[in-house]
Image: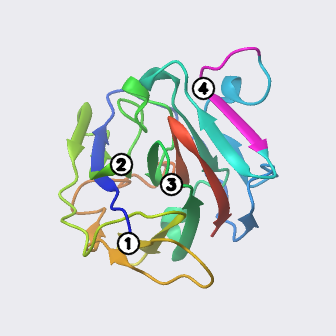
Amino acid sequence: MKTPLSLKLVFAVASLTFSNAALSAATSFSSNLSSLGANLEVADADGFGSNGTTSNEVTLSSSGATFSAAGGNEARNYIRTTGTDYGTVDFTAEVTWNGSGTLFLGFGGGNVGTYGCPDWDVADSLWLELNGTAVGAFQTTVQGSGRTNANIGAFSAPIGGGLTTIRWQYTAATKSIQFFADNNRSGAFVADASSPIFSLTSNLILTDPSDRASIFFGGQSGTFTDFAV
């Protein structure tokens, strides 16, 4: 019997101003997350590797990328693509999670924001929060400050159970995104749950061509493997 996880979807609103840096090309690649390579980076680089502290810690090994935020919410961290213009291309991305701890994943800046949440008060993004049996959806936008519920709507079924693979599916022409989950993943991806389609444009997310549009995941605890886009 599959154990449901909880999911939240969130919007965050940023009040800071950043210079318009050139975006980096979106790239198709895969990684077992035993190393980062050229296509992935840790949002808070101070937390990567053996730096003598457990705060913002991300450890890479043959088991994948393990997050251990002993410092609480403020010690969360994220792995994000170095490619920053995924908003201009159609893509399908996925990552597998061991189902333990608190997971955040999404599309946008991929920064460590207020309270350790993705991009809160920093940049535009749309992200999910999974914790136990709860799923939340949130967004952050530079149109204001803080975060707001994304109103993405209920998923078609509970999420979770053993290794859980989450998939992003983005359509550039309509600037819309949909999430899928394969519970108890084994073999080829089979969607056990799906979200409604969410419009970034209608919700004022990533409306500026200079906005960073990276794919990101991470959080406070848990292990991730097999990222692909």
| C-alpha distance separating marks 2 and 4 | 21 Å
The residue tagged 4 is 56
Q: Is residue 202 above or below residue 204?
A: below
The residue tagged 2 is 132
The residue tagged 3 is 213
Q: Quadrant of the C terminus?
A: bottom right
Amino acid type, callout 2 = Gly
Q: Is residue 17 above or below residue 172?
A: above
| C-alpha distance separating marks 3 and 2 | 28 Å
First of labels 4, 3 by sequence position: 4
Residue 52 lies left or right of residue 47; in this view the side is right
Tell me the SS state at disc 1.
Answer: loop
Mark carried by residue 1: 1
Q: Residue at x 39, y 48 (%)?
A: 125
Which of the two discs, 3 and 2, sits closer to the camera? 2
Q: Does any portion of residue 162 appear in the rendered image?
A: yes
Where is residue 58? Give x, y as percent: 67, 35
| C-alpha distance separating marks 1 and 2 | 15 Å
Where is residue 70? Give x, y as percent: 55, 22
